[in-house]
Amino acid sequence: MNVQIMAHWSCGDCDVEGRDVAAEPTCWNCGGAVTVTARPAVPADLRPTDGAA
Ligand SMILES: [Zn+2]
């Protein structure tokens, strides 16, 4: 199966969260380093998007 890693992260400085397929995601708000909270594997052909189940 073709999968990719989706990093779930949170930024302590901004108190925001996000997710990114990047190995080392950065905060969309401040552009700084973030804390990765989970790295679930997701099917590469079923890319989750915000607002869509
Ligand atoms: Zn931030």
Image (cartoon, helix red, strand yellow):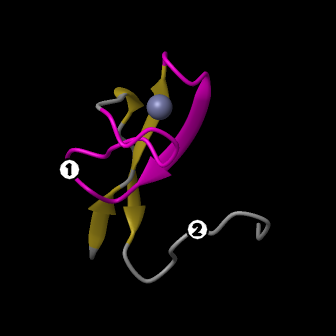
Q: Is residue 24 found inside the magenta-colored segment of the image?
A: yes
Where is residue 35 shown, x and y percent of the image?
A: 36, 23
Q: Which residue is found at the position 51% from the left and 74% from the top?
A: 47
Check disc 1 and report the residue beneath it: 23
Above or below, 6 against 44 in this view is above
Above or below, 33 against 31 in this view is above
Mark sitting earlier along the chain (1/2): 1
Question: Would the CB of label 2 be found within 8 Å of ligand 1?
Answer: no
Q: Is residue 26 found inside the magenta-colored segment of the image?
A: yes
Report the quarter where the N terminus lies: bottom left
Report the quarter where the C terminus lies: bottom right
Check disc 2 and report the residue beneath it: 48
Q: Is residue 53 left or right of residue 23?
A: right
Query: Mark 1: which secondary structure?
Result: loop
Query: Mark 2: which secondary structure?
Result: loop
Q: Which residue is found at the position 49% from the left and 28% from the top?
A: 10
- The kind of residue tagged 2 is Pro
Q: Calculate the distance from the C-alpha at mark 1 to the C-alpha at mark 2.
A: 17 Å
Q: Which residue is found at the position 41% from the left and 55% from the top?
A: 20
Q: Which residue is found at the position 29% from the left and 31% from the top?
A: 33
Q: Which of 12 and 6 is in front in this view?
A: 12
In the image, farthest residue toward the front = 30
Mark 2 crowdedness (10 Å alpha carbons): few <14, some 14-19, many ≥20: few
Q: Which of 26 and 9 is in front in this view?
A: 26
Where is residue 36 shown, x and y percent of the image?
A: 35, 29
The segment highlighted magenta reads 12-32
- The kind of residue tagged 1 is Ala
Q: Which mark is residue 13?
A: none
Q: Quadrant of residue 45?
A: bottom left
